[in-house]
Image: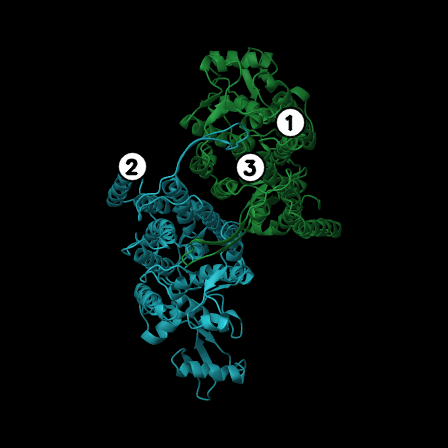
Chain colours: A cyan, B green
Amino acid sequence: MPSTTSPTALSSTESVALSGVAVVCVATLIRTFDGEGEPLVASLALSGLAFAASYAMIRWLGPTFLKAGLKGRDMSKVNNSHYIPECMGAICAVVYLLTIIIFIPFPFYKDIVVATSGGGNRDVVMNVEFVQQGRLLHKFPHSKLASFLSAIISLQSITLLGIGDDLFDIRWRHKFFIPAFASIPLLVIYFVDFGVTSIVLPTFLQPYIGRELLDLGILYYGYMAAFSIFSPNSINILAGINGIEVSQSIVIALLLVLNDALYLLTPYPHPATDSHLFSLYFLLPFLGVSFALLFHNWYPARVFVGDTYCYFAGMVFVVVSILGHFSKTLILLLVPQIFNFIYSLPQLSHVLPCPRHRLPHFSARSGLLEPSVTKWEKDKQPRPIIAQGLRLLAKFKLLRIKEDEEGRIEETSNFTILNLWLVWRGPMREDRLAVEITTMQILVGLFGLFVRHKLALLIFREDNLSIKSPV
Amino acid sequence: MPSTTSPTALSSTESVALSGVAVVCVATLIRTFDGEGEPLVASLALSGLAFAASYAMIRWLGPTFLKAGLKGRDMSKVNNSHYIPECMGAICAVVYLLTIIIFIPFPFYKDIVVATSGGGNRDVVMNVEFVQQGRLLHKFPHSKLASFLSAIISLQSITLLGIGDDLFDIRWRHKFFIPAFASIPLLVIYFVDFGVTSIVLPTFLQPYIGRELLDLGILYYGYMAAFSIFSPNSINILAGINGIEVSQSIVIALLLVLNDALYLLTPYPHPATDSHLFSLYFLLPFLGVSFALLFHNWYPARVFVGDTYCYFAGMVFVVVSILGHFSKTLILLLVPQIFNFIYSLPQLSHVLPCPRHRLPHFSARSGLLEPSVTKWEKDKQPRPIIAQGLRLLAKFKLLRIKEDEEGRIEETSNFTILNLWLVWRGPMREDRLAVEITTMQILVGLFGLFVRHKLALLIFREDNLSIKSPV
């Protein structure tokens, strides 16, 4: 089966296509130097290059990863005896980081000529020009540079820690806090450079509190930290079938891009334009490397993505939404992940037994996936109150229970959204499950954006579609 | 031999000592909040904590590294059959990065309260206070934040790439360029934020060029890139005996700290004060984690440091000296490394055969190190001109040659400073060689600093000991 082994050479079609992409992107990049150096065009071109580079490197470096012991077997296949490379998301992360670093001059370059009296002091400024032109494609204010760099530092931190996790196989209760460490740079630089800890109150609350803005102070940092921990982990636990980690990340990124576009396409300059340009600059190369990974990770997978990718993806969403001040919007897009997390809690918190792997069960006979189950021995039944809860869930079709004739619970399906979907929709092939879950993610996300932009005006005074008013 | 196995628990003495260090440091750190939040004191306290943390983690994580296949055998020991953890410098790098990130608020925190109209815009600034007090312990101007962050990004990049190198065993000709990639963030942000590409000309050249400053433009970036490639690699090739990678790095760091202190202790405010404070903030935690590593890597080594540490150390020196604009000073401190590199060139460039390992040869009989040699077969003699060169080097005591009766070269010592030292001083034990090379590094470095500060006034108009004059 050539498609499931790991050929390391690109086919001639692939080589031609990738070279074509690269040439077009380089040409576009060079053209941006002629004009104003439009950062958004440059970002698109660099994202294309990032796609081509990760696509080729994922292919070429497969054997290197296998040799270094970064490998795994795909248990949901009939022929599951051979290893395929694991942790290939690390390649995407490194390519992404290099891309975003090379991109820095495009939005930030100022026409500044400075001489120094030695020791690196900027005391002899000979000529300063600071030009801001256009709206959509204008240059960033220099003060945004620190935010930009802090985002890069957080993403590099999560990559380092993610690779550590993939290498050392850290225990679940410890790895849960890996994103917390990676959020430290974000929070620290937010504190130093930005420090906005106020939130706009919903209009119906304003009369009671007596103001429009509420300063949450240190609570706001707690909120951001919790958010940084949740987002990467929530993507990491919605996993277990080929392609699902990448496809859900791509959907969330595309929906965020759509949301950004809504702000950039308003007929008047919106005050949040910069935040949403910022977001696009981080999301476009992410989409580039993610599509390259999806090509290799989609059913039947030729590589695994590793925890590194899930953490990294989650952290990309965190940095753009925190630094862009639209974390509530991201929460709306993470609804399937939030559902999956809450639904998983009974097992994650060990109220119910939690097997090491909860991915759907592959039936070698039918070639289809079925819900995986936790078995209950006759003499180790759940406590009555828990058994009642399980039966209640089953009644609402949120669980499949198998009972023996005497009403003892024999097995319950595992608490993940993938298993639940299989309970609802019946056994299906792995790629079909991935397509259906991804479609669900798209629909829920689009609805979330609709809520955000149409219904939010009911409880907040302003939105991107309202006119700008001084707050 | 309990001292050469890897016990993972800290002894009770160690636990008490480390806890003591940690308590003192935390107390000091808390006290800085009472006053002005003196950044230099905070940096010292955090460096102590970094020492304690890396010391404990190096010990605890040994088995984890062994299990993940990051292990090596120490060939310069009688009992060389057991593995010890490799790549432990990665722990130091990660602890260092976390420390320096947590440190950011101390020099940079401004008393600024900002409200936002939504979308993260800083359009409603309610209260801005910008206080600069004192001289030695004053807060940094905010514009330095970008430099600080770019340094962190470069160090994170070299850590990521270094770990990749340790994992995948990259070929020498490729790994040589790893630091080049890591220098990209430094150069990019230097370009965006700083852009000083002028150098002060020596006074005797000024009449000919007609000015004091010469703008090197793009050449300056080439110089910085070359420097970034050289420094980490030069430390990486002065390696091969227990402790030498760490001890040379510690010596260079200490000499840089001494140099910084010279600028801070002048009786008047020196224009380069900020650059040298900046340098101290990066060097002190580096010393903290390096001493923790040295404890474990010193003869007889219980852990290996890995390429990660060497790259990381070299990059720390690069970022402080480039961003502080004192790269010439660093070159003076790297003289032994530069000598070792130039001396190695005949083998590195494959003019002479280059064996995979050139570390000194361990004589199991005497327990001493001897120069390792390259053998020349009778029918594969070097070309006459090269043979002449080798004999010339031997005449100047820069090589040991063994010839047979007919004047054919049988073997030549390998071209590294460690082997050369053994040629000069005779066989010695591994730790003695490390001590002697380290002492040599100290003496050469002190002489370099003397040259820098006493003799530089002959060719440059200003120095930290001259009075400040407008340029």
Rendered image quadrant of residue A138: top left
Q: Quadrant of the C terminus of chain A?
A: bottom left
Q: Nearer the viewer, residue B81 or A389?
A: A389
Tag on residue B316?
A: 3
Give me the chain letter of mark 2: A
Residue denoted by label 2 = A30
Q: Nearer the viewer, residue A201 or A433?
A: A201
Give me the chain letter of mark 1: B
Residue denoted by label 1 = B441
Mark 2 or 3, closer to the camera: 2
Query: Residues at badges 1 and 2 in contact (C-beta under 8 Å)?
Result: no
Image location of residue A394, percent across then percent down: 41, 81
Q: Do marks 1 and 2 both belong to one polypeptide chain?
A: no
Rendered image quadrant of residue B300: top right
Give me the chain letter of mark 3: B
Indicate the amino acid at tag 1: Gln
Image location of residue A446, percent across then percent down: 31, 65
Mark 1 or 3, closer to the camera: 3
Tag on residue A324?
A: none
Q: Quadrant of the N terminus of chain A?
A: bottom left
Rendered image quadrant of residue A432: bottom left
**What separation in Å lies between label 1 and label 3 (alpha carbons)?**
18 Å
Tell me if I can see residue B12 in this picture.
yes
| Sequence-wise first label, 1 or 3 | 3
Callout 3 crowding tier (Cα within 10 Å): few <14, some 14–19, many ≥20: many
Indicate the amino acid at tag 3: Val
Image location of residue B390, percent across then percent down: 54, 15
Indicate the amino acid at tag 2: Ile
Q: Is residue A328 left or right of residue B250?
A: left
